[in-house]
Amino acid sequence: MQVLTDVRNIVKLIIRLRKILAPRKLRVYDYFALLLIEETPGLCPKEIRQELVLLPAGVTRLLNHLESMGLIERQRGTDRRTVPCDLTKKGHLVISEIDRQFLA
């Protein structure tokens, strides 16, 4: 029964997080990707895809979205699958704001 209670609590937290992210036009996977990049600057799309269990097209859309919002930057190269991703100043700020709001 404890496992069921834990799962329900996790679901409640994710619902709360979604409500915080929605006004920023972010999804839970976007936030998870931002946290991964914050913890390990320079991650390449393949590593992010593996950590978040996404298809290649899914990680491309996710990173394009975050980049278009100015939250990450990618080094341009010949193969976008191997370019390192880093948070921008705005990306760091958004994570801090979300964390602060979530913990309030």
Image (spheres, helix red, strand yellow):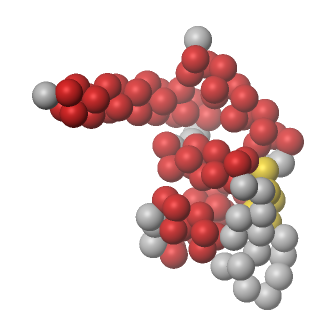
Quarter where residue 77 is shown: bottom right
Q: Position of residue 74 (x, y in %)?
A: 79, 66
From this view, report whether residue 82 is shown above or below residue 27. below
Horizontal relation, residue 96 to residue 22: left or right: right
Horizontal relation, residue 49 to residue 83: left or right: left
Q: Position of residue 4 (x, y in %)?
A: 19, 32
Residue furthest to the left in view is 1
Horizontal relation, residue 92 to residue 2: left or right: right
Q: Residue at x 60, y 69 (%)?
A: 47
The answer to whether residue 58 shows anywhere in this view is no
From this view, report whether residue 39 is shown above or below residue 100. below
Q: In which quadrant of the rendered image does the N terminus lie? A: top left
Quarter where residue 97 is shown: top right
From this view, report whether residue 67 is shown above or below residue 4. below
Q: Nearer the viewer, residue 100 or 3?
A: 3
Q: Residue at x 66, y 20 (%)?
A: 100
From this view, report whether residue 25 is shown above or below residue 76. above
Quarter where residue 94 is shown: top right
Q: Residue at x 77, y 69 (%)?
A: 84
Q: Position of residue 91 (x, y in %)?
A: 76, 43
Residue furthest to the front in view is 2
Q: Nearer the viewer, residue 97 or 48?
A: 48
The answer to whether residue 85 shows anywhere in this view is yes
Q: Nearer the viewer, residue 40 or 27?
A: 40
Residue furthest to the top in view is 104
Q: Nearer the viewer, residue 21 or 54?
A: 54
Q: In which quadrant of the rendered image does the C terminus lie? A: top right
